[in-house]
Image: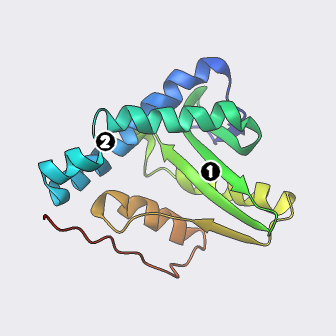
Amino acid sequence: MSEPVFRPAREHDIPEIRRIAKDAWAPIYEGFRKVMGDDLWQNQHAGDPLGAKADQVESHFRNHPDRAFVTEADGNVVGFCTYQLSETGLGTIGNNAVDPACQGRGVGSAMYHECLRRFREAGMKFAKVTTDQDEGHAAARRAYEKIGFKPLRIQVNYFMEL
């Protein structure tokens, strides 16, 4: 695989960004469904949750193209990253994913380094990324920690059937 290249998304990239989002989140959402059970899962994720995630990512690319980029290797889009910049100096990595066929090759780390470079260039003083503690997010946690993020707060969501 060639060295990753980071660039703005083009209109013809949107279907591939959506596919990567769905493919990357499918095992995560399946893990959530197993833990939550079908009834609670359906209550919290009615309809097409993977389609909704892809819609969310596409909306960010369309509405904030200056705070999103794709990662390309060998002429193909292999990942994407969205982010926010705050007036308080906090850069936040948002929805991001690497094509499952390209995971484990350093694409995610390179993508996060690029995002941190953009944060510094924009004058941010701190960087934040949020993820879950489930098995489906283990690779993301490893990638974030590999580039220097440290977990500071862990949130737990409790549910009960009434």
To which quarter of the image does residue 32 belong?
Answer: bottom left
User: Residue visible at 60% across and 74% down?
Assistant: 148
Of callouts 1 and 2, which one flags the residue occurring earlier in the amino acid sequence? 2
Q: Which residue is mark 2?
A: 26
The residue type indicated by label 1 comes to Met
User: Residue visible at 63% across and 42% down?
Assistant: 4
Report the Cα–Cα distance between label 1 and label 2.
Answer: 21 Å
User: Residue visible at 31% across and 51% down?
Assistant: 28
Judging from the image, what secondary structure is the residue with disc 2 in?
A: helix
Residue most toward the front?
A: 162
Per the rendering, the mark at residue 141 is none
Residue most toward the bottom?
A: 152
Foreground residue among 116 and 73: 116
Judging from the image, what secondary structure is the residue with disc 1 in?
A: helix
User: In the rendered view, would you say 89 is above or below 35?
Assistant: below
Foreground residue among 118 and 71: 118
Q: Residues within 10 Å of mark 2 (few under 14, many from 20)?
A: some
User: Residue visible at 79% across and 72% down?
Assistant: 125
Foreground residue among 143 and 14: 14
What is the count of numbered marks?
A: 2
- Residue 80 spot, x, y in % from top left: 58, 41
The residue type indicated by label 2 comes to Ala
Q: Is residue 59 left or right of residue 69?
A: left
Q: Residues within 10 Å of mark 1 (few under 14, many from 20)?
A: many
Q: Is residue 152 left or right of residue 119?
A: left
Q: Is residue 8 visible?
A: yes
Q: Which residue is mark 1?
A: 111
Please state which of the two labelled residues, at mark 1 or mark 2, is closer to the viewer.
2
